[in-house]
Image: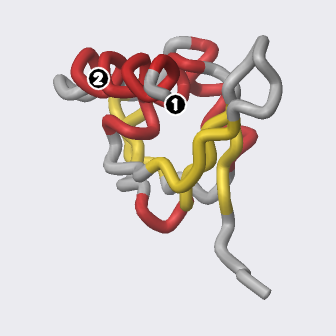
Amino acid sequence: MDNKKRIITKDLYFAAALAAYGGTIEEVDRSNPKEVRFTFDVAMIQPVMIRTVSGTVQAEPEDTDRLRLWFRSGSMWLPPSYPSSLRDIKALIYAR
């Protein structure tokens, strides 16, 4: 059995953020025509930069719930490669 920790998300923008931090998409699940699910291996994602009151800190991606919270709250710093990652994710959605 595979013991890799994964992040599964249907949030296009969160998936692009994970890809911008070095995450590689392991699977694109199109089984539901109304939503696409992306699977990432947590081990491939680089430490994430988080904005705090006292400055910027690095956070490890293993705590996936906090990672989602930081992204949704706007605390996660998005690297310059984010727009490119977003385009790549959109291309995966529409690829057949």
Of the residues shown, which amino acid type is indicated by label 1?
A: Ala
Of the residues shown, which amino acid type is indicated by label 2?
A: Tyr
Q: Residues within 10 Å of mark 2 (few under 14, many from 20)?
A: some
Q: Quadrant of residue 41?
A: bottom right
Q: Residue at x 74, y 18 (%)?
A: 35
Q: Quadrant of residue 95?
A: top left
Residue with the most extreme left position:
80
According to the image, label 1 marks what residue? 15
- How many angstroms separate mark 2 from mark 1 (CA)? 10 Å
Of helix, strand and loop, which one carries label 1?
Answer: helix
Percent of width and height locating residue 59 = 48, 49
Q: Residues within 10 Å of mark 1 (few under 14, many from 20)?
A: many
Residue 24 visible in the current orientation: yes
Q: Residue at x 49, y 67 (%)?
A: 43
Is residue 15 shown left or right of residue 11? left
Residue 52 visible in the current orientation: no
In-front residue for pair 89/53: 89
In-front residue for pair 81/71: 81
Percent of width and height locating residue 67 = 61, 38
The colour scheme applied to this rendered structure is secondary structure
Q: Residue at x 62, y 47 (%)?
A: 39
Q: Is residue 10 above or below residue 59?
A: above
According to the image, label 2 marks what residue? 82
Residue with the most extreme bottom position:
1
Q: In the rendered structure, which disc, 2 or 1, sits on the residue that comes first in sequence?
A: 1
Whether residues under marks 2 and 1 lie with C-beta atoms below 8 angstroms apart, the answer is: no
Percent of width and height locating residue 45 = 42, 55
Q: Quarter of the image containing the N terminus?
A: bottom right
Q: Residue at x 61, y 13 (%)?
A: 73
Of helix, strand and loop, which one carries label 2?
Answer: helix
Percent of width and height locating residue 3 = 72, 81
